[in-house]
Amino acid sequence: MKKLNLPKAKPALLAAAIAIFSFITVVYTSCTPDKCKDVVCQNGGTCGEGNCTCPTGFSGTLCATNDATKFLGTWTGSTNCGSGTQLIITQGTGATILISSNAGTGSCFKTFNMVGTVNGNTATFNQTELDNCANSYTMAGTATITGNSITFSMNFSGAITASCTFAGTK
């Protein structure tokens, strides 16, 4: 009977084991589909497990909806301080909006502009420096959309200190 030569058999067994492992790896990875392969998230969204995670200000299945669009237009209503009866909101850059409105009376009547960042149904306006004749002050606030109505809450500080609310519809 012939004796088995083990040192020569080891490389052959190792090569067979590597071939089987490689085959199993290729078969397994080809059976695991990439859920994001055909998903193209827009506006900087990222795909994970086939779903888009949208950046602030964008929504929808593919992040295609700019949340700012629901704020756009002329809103007519009333405020509990001052005489402003309209907010005019236009598109800013990306997920921002621009509000134009009026403040003051007589020769101090001015139009002010503020930039707000939209997230869902809320826009946040950081402090904006305003000058109304001899008065300098800052204004900050939030605007919230509910259905076809808007509420814009403003806080003034400096020469003028007040909290005001504008409520209106398109």
Image (spheres, grey):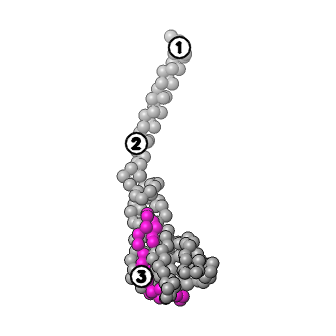
Q: Where is residue 88 in the image (x, y as percent from the top left)?
A: 42, 78
Q: How crowded is mark 1: few (under 14 residues within 10 Å), some or many (20 or more)?
A: few
Q: Is residue 103 visible?
A: yes
- Residue type of the residue flagged with mark 2: Ser
x and y percentages locating residue 169 in the rendered image: 42, 84
- Provide residue 3's location: percent of width, then percent of height: 53, 12
**Sooner in the amino-acid sequence: mark 1 or mark 2:** 1
Residue sitting at x 53%, y 20%: 10
Callout 2 touching callout 3 (CB < 8 Å): no
Q: x%, y% of residue 131? A: 55, 77
Circle 3 sits on which residue?
75
22 vs 97: above or below = above
| SS for dot 1 | loop
Task: Tell which tag, 1 or 3, sits nearer the viewer.
Answer: 3
Residue at the image point whose x is 43% and y is 63% from the top: 94
Q: Give the range drawn in magenta.
A: 77-98
* Residue closest to the eye, 80 or 109: 109
Front residue of 70/127: it is: 127
CA gap, disc 1 and disc 2: 39 Å
The quarter of the rendered structure image containing the C terminus is bottom left
| Marker disc for residue 142 | none
Q: What amino acid is labelled 3 in the image?
A: Trp
Please give the residue where the numbered disc 2 appears in the rendered image.
30
Rate crowding at label 2 as few (under 14), some (14 to 19) or many (20 or more) other CA atoms within 10 Å.
Answer: few
- For the question of whether residue 59 can be seen, the reply is no
Q: In this view, does 6 lie to the left or right of 74?
A: right
**Is 148 drawn above or below residue 34 in the view shown?**
below
Residue type at mark 1?
Answer: Asn
Mark-to-mark CA distance, 2 and 3: 55 Å
